[in-house]
Amino acid sequence: MRLKFVFVGKTRNRALQGEIAEYHRRLRRYLPADIQELREARPGNREEPAVFRRRQAPRLAELLRKERFYRVVLTEQGRAQTTVDFAAWLEQLLASGRPGVCFYLGGAFGFDDSVCRQADYLLSLSPLTFTHELARVILLEQVYRALTIIRGETYHY
């Protein structure tokens, strides 16, 4: 199984770029893992977030429609899980025979509902709100942590 992470927008914070690179390196010890950053459209002058999300939705929905991996969209409306529950969910997915899992994480404004409807699963990292750049680090770390739990390693206590 392969892991794929699709992030909308660039990670500009150098410290977070380093953390993303570190967890990407760690993940690849367990499974092939790719990170793709999509260019984010720019919001118009005084454009409402909902209007902006709708405007960029067709391109993102088309991307999800073409994806052959299991599609997980991160959204605040998604299911929140404990780390152990997330590891169990991921383990089931790994055993399912699917070719891979792809995690989609939006930019500052998130995803339009039309994009979320294309997902196989909606996931929430937390009821708290994080910057989209920090959420990338948290997602990668949690996937790494889940893989160490699945393997019975001591990273998670």
Image (cartoon, rainbow, N blue to C red):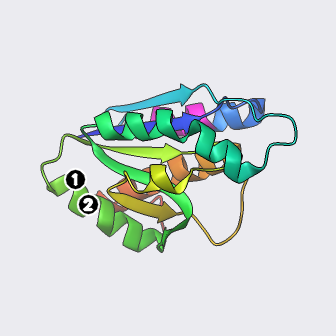
Q: Which residue is drawn at 69% across and 32% down?
A: 11
Q: Is mark 2 on a helix, strand or loop?
A: helix
Please name whichever residue, 83 or 52, is drawn nearer the observer in this view of the structure.
52
Question: How many callouts does the rendering have?
Answer: 2
Q: Provide residue 115's location: percent of width, then percent of height.
A: 47, 49
Amino acid identity at mark 2: Glu
Residue 22 is one of the magenta-drawn residues:
yes
Tell me if residue 89 comes above or below residue 96 in the rendering: below
Please name whichever residue, 149 or 24, is drawn nearer the observer in this view of the structure.
24
**Cα–Cα gap, marks 2 and 1:** 5 Å
- In-image side of 94 versus 19 (left or right): left
Q: Do the residues labelled 2 and 1 touch (CB within 8 Å)?
A: yes
Amino acid identity at mark 1: Leu
Q: Provide residue 136's location: percent of width, then percent of height.
A: 60, 45
The residue that disc 2 covers is 91
Please name whichever residue, 54 or 69, is drawn nearer the observer in this view of the structure.
54
The residue that disc 1 covers is 94
Q: Provide residue 133's location: percent of width, then percent of height.
A: 69, 42
